[in-house]
Amino acid sequence: MTRSHFSTLFAFALLSASAIATQAQQGAASSDQPKPKPEETEVWTPVPPVVTPADNGAPPSDARILFDGKNIDEWVTVKDKSPAQWNVHDGVMTVNKSGGNIETRRSFKNYQLHVEYRIPETITGSGQARGNSGVFLASTGPGDDGYELQVLDNYNNPTYVNGMAGSLYKQAIPLANACRKPGEWNVYDVVWTAPVFNDDGSVKTPAYATVFFNGIIVENHFELKGQTLYIGKPFYKKYDKAPIKLQAHGDKSEPISFRNIWVRELP
Ligand code: MG
């Protein structure tokens, strides 16, 4: 080894030793800091309200009952706000097609909704004309104005997929066909996040819907492009709170029935 090689190696060794010493010092310094405690990331308020759950789709303790099989008092006829004229019998309500769409007396913003419906065992018709109804998650005007979660018998009945049961009509194809056969009860559990608008009517945040159909997720936080439209592209129309609406569809098939409808308002 030449002298200069030795010098270089010696210098390198010195540098390395000093780097290790510095690291050791830094380690010592950081260990002087107070050690994080698990309590620092614990949150104790606000305390969630106690809600008593229920079995088999029955309403939890804080739900607002929209239909419990006894009467139709929470519902009005859409076109003139008169008492709803659908037929309540045997703990269910059956669509009265000549009575028109009905909607809740009350208005809602964000919520969790539970709805059960049954297609008659004797259903006839095909395509969109077989047990057609709908749950409008926000009824923003007369007729079919609003955001429709489609109700239809698709147990063995093809139609356009963005118009089948579990679709957000003409916008969101369901992730699965979870229809039960006619004569059995189907269940929708929905989380609705209402759109928020600026003062000038423009959209601040869009609407979102999550839908479970007989316990199977069919819409997963889907972002809507606006209200439901039968023809044309959807667009938003400013509203704040809105009723929930059920559709009396004009097709000739036998009327369907609803039961056990409840809602829990969300922040
Ligand atoms: Mg419909």
Image: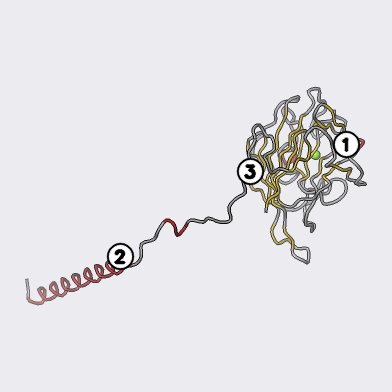
- Which mark sits nearer the N-terminus, 3 or 2? 2
User: Percent x, y for residue 133?
Assistant: 81, 37
Residue carrying label 3? 51
Mark 1 touching mark 2, by CB under 8 A? no
| Classed neighbour count for the residue bearing mark 3: other residues with Cα under 10 Å, few (<14), some (14–19), many (≥20) | few
Look at discs 1 and 2 and give the one toward the viewer. 2
User: Which quadrant of the structure image shows residue 201?
Assistant: bottom right
Quarter of the figure with the N terminus: bottom left
Q: Secondary structure at mark 1?
A: loop
Residue carrying label 1? 250
Q: Which mark is residue 31?
A: 2
Quarter of the figure with the C terminus: bottom right
What's the coloring here? secondary structure
- Distance between the Cα atoms at labels 3 and 2? 45 Å
User: Percent x, y for residue 109?
Assistant: 74, 52
Residue at horizontal 88 percent and vertical 34 percent from the top: 96
Look at discs 3 and 2 and give the one toward the viewer. 3
> Looking at the picture, which amino acid does disc 1 mark?
Gly
| Classed neighbour count for the residue bearing mark 1: other residues with Cα under 10 Å, few (<14), some (14–19), many (≥20) | few
Q: Residue furthest top?
A: 122
> Looking at the picture, which amino acid does disc 2 mark?
Ser
Residue 236 relative to residue 56: left or right:
right
Q: Secondary structure at mark 3?
A: loop
Q: Secondary structure at mark 2?
A: helix
